[in-house]
């Protein structure tokens, strides 16, 4: 009988701990409509503040003359125009690699086709 009370107590504590872990692991909530929009776009094109996304979520093919047919990664940046409005800008970054296989530079392509996952 004592063993069942201890077992029930352990199970109750375990469940309480699991619930607390789930609540604390809830995803971040966007505060503004812009942040909500960026989170949605970020499912395919991660927000990158300059540079190439290290783990691209979406791939693309550039259609711009001179880069046509090159593959790249979707990237999102925040653009604020002269009108003061902010926009989520998505482009296709085409990486270039040196002889050792390291990425040395990239080109931003605005005329692209996203590839299916």
Image: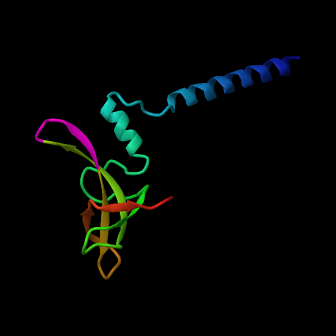
Q: Position of residue 62 (x, y in %)?
A: 33, 67
Apparent side of residue 81 relative to residue 74 in the rendered image (left or right): left
Indicate the position of residue 56 as horizontal and vertical percent values. 40, 58
- Picture coordinates of residue 81, whole percent (x, y): 15, 42
Q: How is the image coloured?
A: rainbow
Based on the displayed image, in which of its 4 quarters is residue 78 positioned? top left
Q: Residue furthest left?
A: 82
Q: On the rendered structure, is 16 left or right of 39? A: right
Q: Which residues are magenta?
A: 82-89
Q: Establish if 41 lies above or below 27.
A: below
Instruction: Choose between 107 and 18: the one closer to the eye.
Output: 107
State left or right for residue 20 relative to residue 97: right
Residue 100 to residue 3: above or below: below
Question: Residue at 89% of width from left, 17% of height from top?
Answer: 1
Q: Is residue 6 above or below residue 21?
A: above
- Residue extending furthest toward the right: 1
Furthest residue to the bottom? Answer: 99
Q: Residue at x 33, y 30 (%)?
A: 33
Q: Does 30 lie within the magenta span?
A: no
Q: Nearer the viewer, residue 94 or 85?
A: 85
x then y, percent, for residue 91: 30, 56
| Magenta span contains residue 83 | yes
> At x 41% / y 57%, what residue is drawn?
55
Q: Quadrant of residue 82?
A: top left
50 w.r.t. 95: above or below: above
Q: How many marks?
A: 0
Q: At x 57% / y 30%, what residue is drawn?
A: 22
Front position in the image: 115 or 51: 115
């Amino acid at each position: 009988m004592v063993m069942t009370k201890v077992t029930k107590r352990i199970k109750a504590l375990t469940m309480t701990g699991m619930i607390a872990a789930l609540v604390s692991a809830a995803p971040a909530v966007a505060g503004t409509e812009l942040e909500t929009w960026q989170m949605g776009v970020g499912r395919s094109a991660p927000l990158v503040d300059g540079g190439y996304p290290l783990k691209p979520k979406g791939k693309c093919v550039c259609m711009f003359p001179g880069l046509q047919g090159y593959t790249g990664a979707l990237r999102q940046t925040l653009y604020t125009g002269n009108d003061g409005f902010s926009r989520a800008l998505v482009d296709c970054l085409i990486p270039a690699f040196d002889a050792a296989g390291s990425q040395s530079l990239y080109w931003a392509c605005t005329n692209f086709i996203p590839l299916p996952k």
